[in-house]
Amino acid sequence: MKTLITGGTGLVGQAIQSISTQYPNHNFTFLSSSDCDLTDFSKTLEYFKSLQPDYVIHLAACVGGLYKNINYKVDMLEKNLTINYNVLKCCHLTGVKKCVSCLSTCIFPDKTTYPINENMLHDGPPHTSNDAYAYAKRMLEIHSKSYREQYGSNFICVIPTNIYGPHDNFHLNDAHVIPALIHKCYLAKQEGKPFIVRGTGSPLRQFIYSEDLAKLIMWTLEKYEENDSIILSVSEKDEVSIGKIAELIAGEFDYLDNMKYDTNYSDGQYKKTADNSKLMSLFGDFEFTSMDEGMKKSVRWFIDNYEKCRK
Ligand code: NAP
Ligand code: GDP
Protein backbone atom coordinates (compact mmCIF):
# COMPACT_ATOMS: atom_id res chain seq x y z
CA MET A 1 0.00 0.00 0.00
CA LYS A 2 1.37 3.38 -0.97
CA THR A 3 0.86 5.86 1.86
CA LEU A 4 1.62 9.51 1.24
CA ILE A 5 2.32 11.78 4.21
CA THR A 6 1.96 15.44 3.25
CA GLY A 7 3.93 17.61 5.68
CA GLY A 8 6.27 14.63 5.99
CA THR A 9 9.18 16.84 7.09
CA GLY A 10 7.28 18.60 9.92
CA LEU A 11 6.87 17.80 13.61
CA VAL A 12 4.15 15.18 13.11
CA GLY A 13 5.47 13.90 9.76
CA GLN A 14 8.87 13.21 11.32
CA ALA A 15 7.19 11.42 14.23
CA ILE A 16 5.41 9.13 11.74
CA GLN A 17 8.78 8.55 10.05
CA SER A 18 10.27 7.54 13.40
CA ILE A 19 7.67 4.76 13.88
CA SER A 20 7.28 3.83 10.20
CA THR A 21 9.14 0.49 10.49
CA GLN A 22 6.31 -0.72 12.76
CA TYR A 23 4.01 -0.60 9.70
CA PRO A 24 5.69 -2.86 7.10
CA ASN A 25 2.51 -3.07 4.99
CA HIS A 26 2.79 0.66 4.20
CA ASN A 27 5.20 1.96 1.58
CA PHE A 28 5.54 5.51 2.93
CA THR A 29 6.38 8.67 1.03
CA PHE A 30 7.16 11.70 3.21
CA LEU A 31 6.49 14.82 1.18
CA SER A 32 8.18 18.20 1.76
CA SER A 33 7.39 21.55 0.12
CA SER A 34 10.51 21.19 -2.02
CA ASP A 35 9.18 17.86 -3.42
CA CYS A 36 5.91 19.54 -4.35
CA ASP A 37 4.43 22.94 -3.52
CA LEU A 38 0.91 21.98 -2.49
CA THR A 39 -0.32 25.54 -3.01
CA ASP A 40 0.14 24.91 -6.76
CA PHE A 41 -2.80 22.88 -8.07
CA SER A 42 -1.24 21.64 -11.31
CA LYS A 43 1.98 20.55 -9.58
CA THR A 44 -0.05 18.83 -6.87
CA LEU A 45 -2.15 16.95 -9.42
CA GLU A 46 0.93 15.97 -11.39
CA TYR A 47 2.53 14.68 -8.17
CA PHE A 48 -0.55 12.66 -7.16
CA LYS A 49 -0.94 11.21 -10.68
CA SER A 50 2.66 10.10 -10.70
CA LEU A 51 2.69 8.60 -7.17
CA GLN A 52 -0.87 7.15 -7.21
CA PRO A 53 -1.11 6.86 -3.41
CA ASP A 54 -3.62 4.44 -1.87
CA TYR A 55 -3.73 6.34 1.41
CA VAL A 56 -2.99 9.94 2.33
CA ILE A 57 -2.25 11.39 5.75
CA HIS A 58 -2.62 15.11 5.14
CA LEU A 59 -0.51 17.10 7.62
CA ALA A 60 0.95 19.86 5.42
CA ALA A 61 -0.12 23.29 6.60
CA CYS A 62 0.99 26.78 7.43
CA VAL A 63 1.35 26.23 11.19
CA GLY A 64 2.41 28.36 14.14
CA GLY A 65 1.77 29.43 17.68
CA LEU A 66 -0.45 32.19 19.03
CA TYR A 67 1.74 35.09 17.84
CA LYS A 68 2.12 33.74 14.29
CA ASN A 69 -1.65 33.32 14.16
CA ILE A 70 -2.10 36.93 15.27
CA ASN A 71 0.53 38.43 12.93
CA TYR A 72 0.10 36.43 9.69
CA LYS A 73 -3.64 36.02 9.25
CA VAL A 74 -3.64 36.25 5.46
CA ASP A 75 -0.98 33.52 5.18
CA MET A 76 -2.79 31.31 7.70
CA LEU A 77 -6.02 31.66 5.75
CA GLU A 78 -4.86 31.62 2.12
CA LYS A 79 -2.11 29.01 2.33
CA ASN A 80 -4.19 26.60 4.35
CA LEU A 81 -7.35 27.01 2.26
CA THR A 82 -5.30 26.48 -0.91
CA ILE A 83 -3.25 23.51 0.31
CA ASN A 84 -6.33 21.78 1.71
CA TYR A 85 -8.40 22.41 -1.41
CA ASN A 86 -5.64 21.06 -3.66
CA VAL A 87 -4.89 17.98 -1.58
CA LEU A 88 -8.51 16.88 -1.16
CA LYS A 89 -9.35 17.50 -4.80
CA CYS A 90 -6.29 15.52 -5.95
CA CYS A 91 -7.15 12.69 -3.54
CA HIS A 92 -10.56 12.59 -5.21
CA LEU A 93 -9.26 12.84 -8.78
CA THR A 94 -6.69 10.06 -8.30
CA GLY A 95 -8.98 7.67 -6.37
CA VAL A 96 -7.28 7.76 -2.96
CA LYS A 97 -8.94 5.09 -0.77
CA LYS A 98 -8.69 6.96 2.53
CA CYS A 99 -7.50 10.45 3.44
CA VAL A 100 -6.93 11.42 7.08
CA SER A 101 -6.54 15.20 7.49
CA CYS A 102 -5.40 17.14 10.50
CA LEU A 103 -7.48 19.82 12.25
CA SER A 104 -6.69 21.20 15.73
CA THR A 105 -8.49 21.71 19.05
CA CYS A 106 -7.57 25.40 18.75
CA ILE A 107 -10.21 25.88 16.02
CA PHE A 108 -13.20 25.25 18.32
CA PRO A 109 -15.54 28.09 19.33
CA ASP A 110 -14.21 30.66 21.77
CA LYS A 111 -17.43 31.02 23.77
CA THR A 112 -18.37 27.46 24.57
CA THR A 113 -19.02 24.97 27.33
CA TYR A 114 -16.32 22.57 28.49
CA PRO A 115 -15.15 19.99 27.76
CA ILE A 116 -15.31 20.52 24.01
CA ASN A 117 -16.32 17.48 21.96
CA GLU A 118 -16.29 16.60 18.26
CA ASN A 119 -19.88 17.81 17.71
CA MET A 120 -19.16 21.40 18.78
CA LEU A 121 -16.67 22.43 16.07
CA HIS A 122 -18.98 24.76 14.16
CA ASP A 123 -21.07 26.02 17.10
CA GLY A 124 -19.69 29.58 17.19
CA PRO A 125 -16.81 31.83 16.11
CA PRO A 126 -13.25 30.86 17.07
CA HIS A 127 -11.08 33.09 19.29
CA THR A 128 -10.12 36.23 17.31
CA SER A 129 -6.38 35.53 17.76
CA ASN A 130 -6.50 32.55 15.40
CA ASP A 131 -9.75 33.01 13.46
CA ALA A 132 -8.02 32.96 10.04
CA TYR A 133 -6.31 29.60 10.70
CA ALA A 134 -9.41 28.23 12.42
CA TYR A 135 -11.83 29.00 9.59
CA ALA A 136 -9.43 27.50 7.01
CA LYS A 137 -9.22 24.33 9.11
CA ARG A 138 -12.99 24.23 9.67
CA MET A 139 -13.42 24.31 5.88
CA LEU A 140 -11.18 21.24 5.65
CA GLU A 141 -13.70 19.39 7.78
CA ILE A 142 -16.61 20.62 5.66
CA HIS A 143 -14.70 19.73 2.49
CA SER A 144 -13.98 16.17 3.72
CA LYS A 145 -17.61 15.71 4.80
CA SER A 146 -18.83 16.99 1.43
CA TYR A 147 -16.70 14.41 -0.42
CA ARG A 148 -18.07 11.70 1.86
CA GLU A 149 -21.65 12.77 1.25
CA GLN A 150 -21.48 13.43 -2.51
CA TYR A 151 -19.01 10.74 -3.60
CA GLY A 152 -18.83 8.31 -0.66
CA SER A 153 -15.11 9.11 -0.26
CA ASN A 154 -13.39 7.88 2.88
CA PHE A 155 -12.07 11.32 3.81
CA ILE A 156 -12.01 12.05 7.52
CA CYS A 157 -10.36 14.43 10.00
CA VAL A 158 -8.53 14.04 13.27
CA ILE A 159 -8.45 16.83 15.85
CA PRO A 160 -5.20 16.84 17.82
CA THR A 161 -4.55 19.06 20.78
CA ASN A 162 -1.26 21.06 21.09
CA ILE A 163 1.63 18.89 19.91
CA TYR A 164 5.31 18.91 20.92
CA GLY A 165 8.39 16.78 20.37
CA PRO A 166 11.60 16.36 18.36
CA HIS A 167 11.79 18.14 14.96
CA ASP A 168 9.44 20.90 16.11
CA ASN A 169 9.78 24.46 14.83
CA PHE A 170 11.70 26.32 17.59
CA HIS A 171 11.26 29.84 16.16
CA LEU A 172 11.36 32.46 18.95
CA ASN A 173 8.28 34.41 17.77
CA ASP A 174 6.31 32.13 15.49
CA ALA A 175 6.54 28.73 17.22
CA HIS A 176 4.06 27.12 19.59
CA VAL A 177 4.61 27.66 23.29
CA ILE A 178 6.70 24.57 24.16
CA PRO A 179 9.32 24.85 21.38
CA ALA A 180 9.45 28.67 21.72
CA LEU A 181 10.06 28.42 25.47
CA ILE A 182 12.63 25.63 25.11
CA HIS A 183 14.60 27.87 22.74
CA LYS A 184 14.16 30.95 24.98
CA CYS A 185 15.26 29.13 28.13
CA TYR A 186 18.30 27.70 26.32
CA LEU A 187 19.38 31.22 25.23
CA ALA A 188 18.51 32.83 28.58
CA LYS A 189 20.71 30.36 30.44
CA GLN A 190 23.59 30.79 27.98
CA GLU A 191 23.41 34.59 28.23
CA GLY A 192 22.61 34.69 31.98
CA LYS A 193 19.46 36.69 31.25
CA PRO A 194 15.87 36.25 32.53
CA PHE A 195 13.79 33.48 30.96
CA ILE A 196 10.83 35.49 29.61
CA VAL A 197 7.44 33.78 29.37
CA ARG A 198 4.80 35.69 27.41
CA GLY A 199 1.42 36.46 28.96
CA THR A 200 0.37 35.64 32.53
CA GLY A 201 1.11 31.91 32.54
CA SER A 202 -2.45 31.17 33.66
CA PRO A 203 -3.98 29.76 30.40
CA LEU A 204 -4.56 26.01 30.33
CA ARG A 205 -3.67 23.60 27.54
CA GLN A 206 -3.50 19.86 26.82
CA PHE A 207 -0.31 18.65 25.11
CA ILE A 208 0.32 15.43 23.20
CA TYR A 209 3.80 14.05 22.49
CA SER A 210 4.35 13.86 18.72
CA GLU A 211 5.16 10.14 18.65
CA ASP A 212 1.92 9.35 20.54
CA LEU A 213 0.00 11.36 17.97
CA ALA A 214 1.83 9.53 15.14
CA LYS A 215 0.65 6.18 16.55
CA LEU A 216 -2.91 7.48 16.94
CA ILE A 217 -2.98 8.82 13.39
CA MET A 218 -1.81 5.43 12.07
CA TRP A 219 -4.53 3.79 14.19
CA THR A 220 -7.07 6.20 12.65
CA LEU A 221 -5.88 5.28 9.17
CA GLU A 222 -5.97 1.54 9.78
CA LYS A 223 -8.77 1.00 12.29
CA TYR A 224 -11.07 4.01 12.65
CA GLU A 225 -14.11 3.44 10.44
CA GLU A 226 -16.55 6.11 11.62
CA ASN A 227 -17.45 9.10 9.47
CA ASP A 228 -17.08 11.83 12.02
CA SER A 229 -13.95 13.60 13.16
CA ILE A 230 -12.18 12.32 16.26
CA ILE A 231 -10.30 14.27 18.94
CA LEU A 232 -6.79 12.86 19.56
CA SER A 233 -5.83 14.21 22.96
CA VAL A 234 -4.71 13.35 26.43
CA SER A 235 -7.41 13.43 29.08
CA GLU A 236 -8.95 16.57 30.59
CA LYS A 237 -7.14 15.70 33.82
CA ASP A 238 -3.83 16.24 32.04
CA GLU A 239 -4.55 19.87 31.22
CA VAL A 240 -1.70 22.08 32.52
CA SER A 241 -1.09 25.81 32.88
CA ILE A 242 1.45 27.62 30.71
CA GLY A 243 3.19 28.58 33.96
CA LYS A 244 3.63 24.89 34.84
CA ILE A 245 5.00 24.18 31.35
CA ALA A 246 7.49 27.05 31.72
CA GLU A 247 8.61 25.62 35.09
CA LEU A 248 9.01 22.16 33.59
CA ILE A 249 11.20 23.60 30.83
CA ALA A 250 13.22 25.74 33.25
CA GLY A 251 13.67 22.64 35.41
CA GLU A 252 15.09 20.71 32.45
CA PHE A 253 17.66 23.49 31.96
CA ASP A 254 18.24 23.86 35.72
CA TYR A 255 17.33 27.55 35.36
CA LEU A 256 14.32 27.90 37.66
CA ASP A 257 15.31 31.03 39.54
CA ASN A 258 15.33 33.60 36.74
CA MET A 259 11.88 33.30 35.14
CA LYS A 260 9.71 36.38 34.38
CA TYR A 261 6.30 36.93 32.79
CA ASP A 262 5.85 39.61 30.13
CA THR A 263 2.17 40.52 30.44
CA ASN A 264 2.36 42.97 27.53
CA TYR A 265 1.76 39.87 25.40
CA SER A 266 -1.66 38.33 24.87
CA ASP A 267 -2.66 35.12 26.68
CA GLY A 268 -4.84 33.98 23.79
CA GLN A 269 -7.84 31.81 24.64
CA TYR A 270 -7.91 30.93 28.36
CA LYS A 271 -8.55 27.23 27.75
CA LYS A 272 -9.74 24.80 25.09
CA THR A 273 -10.30 21.72 27.23
CA ALA A 274 -11.00 18.83 24.88
CA ASP A 275 -12.91 15.65 25.69
CA ASN A 276 -11.05 12.51 24.58
CA SER A 277 -13.81 10.08 25.60
CA LYS A 278 -14.60 9.06 22.01
CA LEU A 279 -10.96 8.02 21.50
CA MET A 280 -10.92 6.26 24.86
CA SER A 281 -14.12 4.35 24.05
CA LEU A 282 -12.41 2.92 20.94
CA PHE A 283 -8.77 2.69 22.06
CA GLY A 284 -8.98 2.71 25.85
CA ASP A 285 -5.65 1.02 26.49
CA PHE A 286 -3.57 3.57 24.58
CA GLU A 287 -0.70 4.69 26.79
CA PHE A 288 0.29 8.35 26.53
CA THR A 289 3.84 9.52 27.16
CA SER A 290 4.02 11.57 30.38
CA MET A 291 4.80 15.30 30.10
CA ASP A 292 7.98 14.74 32.14
CA GLU A 293 9.30 12.12 29.74
CA GLY A 294 8.13 13.93 26.57
CA MET A 295 9.66 17.20 27.73
CA LYS A 296 12.97 15.54 28.61
CA LYS A 297 13.15 13.99 25.12
CA SER A 298 12.18 17.27 23.41
CA VAL A 299 14.74 19.38 25.30
CA ARG A 300 17.44 16.75 24.71
CA TRP A 301 16.62 16.69 20.99
CA PHE A 302 16.75 20.49 20.75
CA ILE A 303 20.15 20.68 22.49
CA ASP A 304 21.59 17.84 20.38
CA ASN A 305 20.27 19.34 17.14
CA TYR A 306 20.65 23.05 17.92
CA GLU A 307 22.67 23.89 14.81
CA LYS A 308 20.38 22.30 12.25
CA CYS A 309 16.87 22.44 13.77
CA ARG A 310 14.15 24.83 12.55
CA LYS A 311 14.41 27.99 14.63
P1 NAP B 1 5.09 21.73 10.89
O1 NAP B 1 6.09 21.07 11.77
O2 NAP B 1 5.08 23.22 10.81
O3 NAP B 1 5.27 21.14 9.44
C1 NAP B 1 4.53 21.64 8.37
C2 NAP B 1 4.72 20.72 7.20
O4 NAP B 1 3.93 21.20 6.11
C3 NAP B 1 6.18 20.65 6.71
O5 NAP B 1 6.46 19.33 6.32
C4 NAP B 1 6.15 21.58 5.50
O6 NAP B 1 7.11 21.24 4.51
C5 NAP B 1 4.74 21.28 4.96
N1 NAP B 1 4.29 22.36 4.09
C6 NAP B 1 4.02 23.64 4.44
N2 NAP B 1 3.66 24.35 3.34
C7 NAP B 1 3.72 23.49 2.29
C8 NAP B 1 3.48 23.61 0.91
N3 NAP B 1 3.11 24.78 0.35
N4 NAP B 1 3.64 22.53 0.12
C9 NAP B 1 4.01 21.34 0.64
N5 NAP B 1 4.24 21.15 1.97
C10 NAP B 1 4.11 22.22 2.77
O7 NAP B 1 3.62 21.28 11.27
P2 NAP B 1 3.16 20.19 12.36
O8 NAP B 1 3.26 20.86 13.69
O9 NAP B 1 3.82 18.89 12.08
O10 NAP B 1 1.61 20.10 12.02
C11 NAP B 1 1.06 19.00 11.32
C12 NAP B 1 -0.44 19.15 11.28
O11 NAP B 1 -0.97 19.17 12.60
C13 NAP B 1 -0.90 20.47 10.64
O12 NAP B 1 -2.00 20.23 9.81
C14 NAP B 1 -1.28 21.34 11.83
O13 NAP B 1 -2.26 22.29 11.47
C15 NAP B 1 -1.79 20.31 12.80
N6 NAP B 1 -1.69 20.67 14.23
C16 NAP B 1 -0.49 21.07 14.76
C17 NAP B 1 -0.42 21.38 16.11
C18 NAP B 1 0.89 21.75 16.79
O14 NAP B 1 0.87 22.03 18.00
N7 NAP B 1 2.02 21.72 16.10
C19 NAP B 1 -1.57 21.28 16.92
C20 NAP B 1 -2.76 20.85 16.33
C21 NAP B 1 -2.81 20.56 14.99
P3 NAP B 1 8.61 21.88 4.53
O15 NAP B 1 9.33 21.18 5.64
O16 NAP B 1 9.18 21.57 3.21
O17 NAP B 1 8.42 23.35 4.80
P1 GDP C 1 -2.33 28.08 21.31
O1 GDP C 1 -2.40 26.92 22.24
O2 GDP C 1 -2.97 27.81 19.99
O3 GDP C 1 -2.84 29.34 21.95
O4 GDP C 1 -0.84 28.35 20.91
P2 GDP C 1 0.58 28.34 21.61
O5 GDP C 1 1.18 27.00 21.59
O6 GDP C 1 1.30 29.43 20.92
O7 GDP C 1 0.36 28.71 23.16
C1 GDP C 1 0.00 30.00 23.51
C2 GDP C 1 -0.02 30.21 25.02
O8 GDP C 1 1.32 30.13 25.54
C3 GDP C 1 -0.51 31.63 25.33
O9 GDP C 1 -1.16 31.64 26.58
C4 GDP C 1 0.80 32.41 25.40
O10 GDP C 1 0.68 33.59 26.18
C5 GDP C 1 1.70 31.39 26.08
N1 GDP C 1 3.14 31.65 25.81
C6 GDP C 1 4.07 32.05 26.72
N2 GDP C 1 5.25 32.28 26.13
C7 GDP C 1 5.08 31.98 24.80
C8 GDP C 1 5.97 32.02 23.69
O11 GDP C 1 7.15 32.37 23.76
N3 GDP C 1 5.44 31.63 22.49
C9 GDP C 1 4.14 31.23 22.36
N4 GDP C 1 3.70 30.83 21.16
N5 GDP C 1 3.28 31.21 23.40
C10 GDP C 1 3.74 31.58 24.60
Image (cartoon, rainbow, N blue to C red):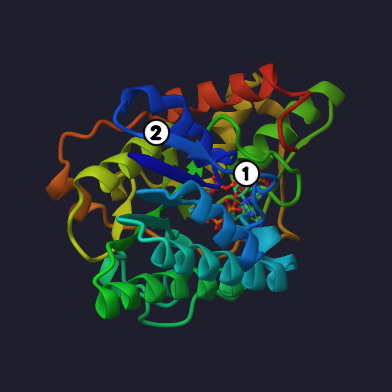
Viewport quadrant of the C terminus: top right
Find residue 130 and report its image quarter.
Answer: bottom right
Residue under the image location 26 percent in, 41 percent down: 219
The amino acid type of the residue labelled 1 equals: Ser
The percent coordinates of residue 158 (x first, y second) are 35, 56
Q: CA distance from mark 1 to mark 2?
A: 17 Å
Left or right: residue 212 compared with residue 30: left
Q: Residues within 10 Å of mark 2 (few under 14, many from 20)?
A: some
Above or below, comparing residue 201 to residue 141 in the picture:
above
Residue under the image location 40 percent in, 26 percent down: 19
Give the foreground label among 1 and 2. 2
Find residue 199 and report its image quarter.
Answer: bottom right
- Pick the residue in front: 47 or 246: 47
Label 2 element class = strand
The residue carrying mark 2 is: 27
Instruction: Kindly indicate whether the residue at mark 2 contacts the one at mark 1 (C-beta within 8 angstroms).
Output: no
Above or below, comparing residue 10 to residue 160 in the picture:
above
**Mark 1 CB in 8 Å range of ligand 1?**
yes
Residue under the image location 54 percent in, 67 percent down: 86
Residue under the image location 18 percent in, 55 percent down: 225
Label 1 element class = loop
Find residue 75 and report its image quarter.
Answer: bottom right
Mark 1 vs mark 2: which is more N-terminal? 2
- Pick the residue in front: 260 or 277: 277
The residue carrying mark 1 is: 32
The amino acid type of the residue labelled 2 equals: Asn
| Extreme residue in the right direction | 191
